[in-house]
Amino acid sequence: MATPRFTTVYRVQGDAASIEARAQAIAVEQSVEMPVTAIAEPEIVTDIVGRVEAIEDRGGGLFDVRIGLALSTTGLEAAQFLNMVFGNASLYEDVVLQDVEIPTELATAFGGPRHGIGGLRQRVGAVGRAFTCSAIKPQGVPPARLAELAGRFARGGIDFVKDDHGLADQRYSPFADRVAACADAVDRAAQATGHATRYVPSLSGDLDRMRRQIDAARAAGIDTVLIAPMLAGWATFQTLARTFPDIAFIAHPTMGGAARIAPELLVGKLFRLLGADAVIFPNHGGRFGYTPETCRALAGQARAHWDGVRPSVPVPAGGMTLDRVPEMLDFYGPDAMLLIGGSLLAARERLTEETAAFTRAVAQHSYR
Amino acid sequence: MATPRFTTVYRVQGDAASIEARAQAIAVEQSVEMPVTAIAEPEIVTDIVGRVEAIEDRGGGLFDVRIGLALSTTGLEAAQFLNMVFGNASLYEDVVLQDVEIPTELATAFGGPRHGIGGLRQRVGAVGRAFTCSAIKPQGVPPARLAELAGRFARGGIDFVKDDHGLADQRYSPFADRVAACADAVDRAAQATGHATRYVPSLSGDLDRMRRQIDAARAAGIDTVLIAPMLAGWATFQTLARTFPDIAFIAHPTMGGAARIAPELLVGKLFRLLGADAVIFPNHGGRFGYTPETCRALAGQARAHWDGVRPSVPVPAGGMTLDRVPEMLDFYGPDAMLLIGGSLLAARERLTEETAAFTRAVAQHSYR
C-alpha cells in the first residue's frame, strides 16, 4: 500500500526555467533534507521523500507548488507538523506557505474546536446574531482598575471581555489577582444584566504555568481563555486543548508574521485545526494591512464545512470602531464576533453606554 | 525614578513625511495597544507606553526606528518578551525587527548559554580549532540504521552527531529507541577512537515530553540536545535551560522565518540569550539565501563579548561540502562548529573515511 500523504501548497517566486528544480528542492527540504542520491534505502525514496504533485503558474513570476508529504513524518504531533510543512522552508525568502490539505487522520489527532461557533453561542446565549467582544487595557494598571473596566463592559451587555494580549503575569497585574478580580466584577455585572458575559483571561508562560492558570480560571468559574499559538508553541496548544475539553480557546495572532504563511491558512484553518473556538485577526481598514479578500478568505476558512471539525468563530479586530459595525456585520454575517477595544475605552466614563450602543447595534442589525 | 526601559530597533519601509506617525504607532502597538488619549492614568503614559527614541533614515525608503519599551511589560518571561518586542508588529508587512538591546535584568533572567563555547570545548576536547558536526538522516529509517550511521560518523572522529531536525517521535523511529541505539553506537565508537564524540538528540513535543526526553537522554549518558526555539516556544526553552543546567542546548533555526526578524538578531543574539550553547544557521552559498554579511553578523552576535552571558558557538550549515571547509574556517575562525550532513552521507560506505577527512581538515587548518 502506498504511504498516506497530504498536500502542502507553496507559493514560490521564480521563473519557468527553474521552478521545477526549485519545487523538487522544497520537497526534499521538507522531508529528508539530504541529497536523494545519498539515500541507500529505496523505500525511503518511495515513502518518505516529498513528492512534487503539480506546479501551477499563477502569473507575475509566482508559482503554486503542490507537494505531497508523508503523513508519517508529522508523528501526528502539532509542532512537528509545523516543522514538516514549513520549518526550514520558512527560511527561504521567496516561499510562502499557501495551503495545507488536512487529511482525516490529522484532523482527528488535533481535534479542532471543542466547542466552536455553536458551543460559544450556547455559552453567552447569542442566537441569530454576531458575537460582541472587547478587551481590557492598558497594561500597567492594577487588577482593580482592569476589573472595573471589565465590569463596565459587562454592564453594557457584551458577550466576551478579554484580556489585552499584552497582559501576562507582570508584577503590576499578576494573573491570579487579575483573574479573581475580573471574574468577580463580570459575574456581578452579569447577574445585574441577566446576560451571561464571559471574562476571557490571557494565558502566558510555559505549559506548567498555563495549566495552573487554567485551573485557577476554572476555579473562578471561567470557561473561555485566550491563547497565542505562535508564542505558546503548537505542542503546548495541542496539549491544553486535549487536557481541558471543557475550556473554549480564543486564538490571538500575535507573532503570526503573516507575510510568510498565508493568513487565511495560519489563522483561519490551522489555528482552528489546533482547537481554537474563535480566531482573532486584524480586520481590513484597521491598524494592519490585511486586504478585504484576505479577511473574507480567512473567515471562510474558519467556518468552512469540515467533516468532524467544528467551525471556529472569526473575530475581526484591530482598530475597529462603532461606526463600522453595520458594514462589518454585512461583510462577515452573524457567524462572527466583533471585537472593539480601544475605541470603546476611549469613551472613558461613558464606557458602559458606548458598549450598550455596540451590543444594540449588533443585536438589531438587519443582515443584507 | 524613571521606569527601566530597553531599546528595540525596527526597520520600517516608509517615507519621511509619515515615518514619525508610523514610529509612534509601533510604539503604541508594542505596549498598550490602545489610543493613548483613551488612557486615564498619567503614570501609564509615562511608564508603560512605548517611547520613540530616535528615527534614522537608512536611505532607499528604509528607516530604523528605535523604541524604548518598559522592561516591566515583559514580566521577565521569554514568550512575553517576544510578544512585547515583535508580537503584533510581526503582522505589519513593512516592519522587520532589527535589534533588541538587552538590559542586564533580562540577561540575568534568561541566563544565556550555561556552557557556551568554552563548555563545549571541554566536552569534546576541542582545543584551538573549530568544532565538527554532522547529522543522521534520512527520517524514515529505523533506529538501528540511524545508530549505524552515528557510529560511523563517530569512528571518523567527529565532535557532534546530531539528529536531523525532522526526527521527532515518529513511529518509524521513536525517540526512546533511537536515543538508546545511537548513544550506544557512539559510545562504542568513542571508546575505539578515544575521541569524546557527542550524540545530540532532537527534542520534540510539549514541555512534559521534552522533559521526559531529556531525562531519558541523560540516563543514556547524553549531555547535549537539539532544540528548535520557534517550534518549542520560547517559554518552553527558557524552562528547559533553567531545569537542566548540566545539559548543553544546540538551537535549530527551523520556522525562523528570518525575513521578518533579522537573522543575526533572532539566531545570533536571542537564541543565545535564551540559553543556546550553539546556534545552527544556513551558511551563505548553501541551500538558503543568507548573505556573507548576514552570516558574519550572526556569528558576531553569537560570540560578541557580553557581560555575564557566555558566548555561543556559531554553526554554519545547510548544504555544506568538504571542499568548502578551508574557506569556512577562514571566514568563521576556530570559535565555530562546521556542520556537514548530506554531503558526508552521500559517501555511503565511505562515510567514516569522509568524516575522518572532514575532521582532519578542521584539525590541520592554518587560519589566515
Image: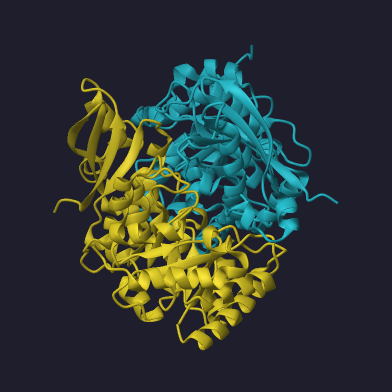
Chain colours: A cyan, B yellow
Of residue A191 and residue A123, the one placed in the foreground of this image is A123
Residue A79: percent from the left, percent from the top? 58, 54
* Left or right: A265 as drawn, with respect to B15: right
- Give the quarter of the image for residue B275: bottom left
Residue A244: percent from the left, percent from the top? 64, 56
Residue drawn at point x = 50 percent, y = 44 percent: A90
* Left or right: A106 as drawn, with respect to B348: right
* Left or right: A86 as drawn, with respect to B273: right
Residue B368: percent from the left, percent from the top? 23, 62
Residue A16: percent from the left, percent from the top? 57, 26
Against B207, is A93 above or below? above
Residue drawn at point x = 55 percent, y = 58 percent: B342
Of residue B274 and residue B43, the one placed in the foreground of this image is B274
Of residue B118 and residue A126, the one placed in the foreground of this image is B118
Residue drawn at point x = 45 percent, y = 62 percent: B339
Quarter of the figure that contains the C terminus of chain A: top right
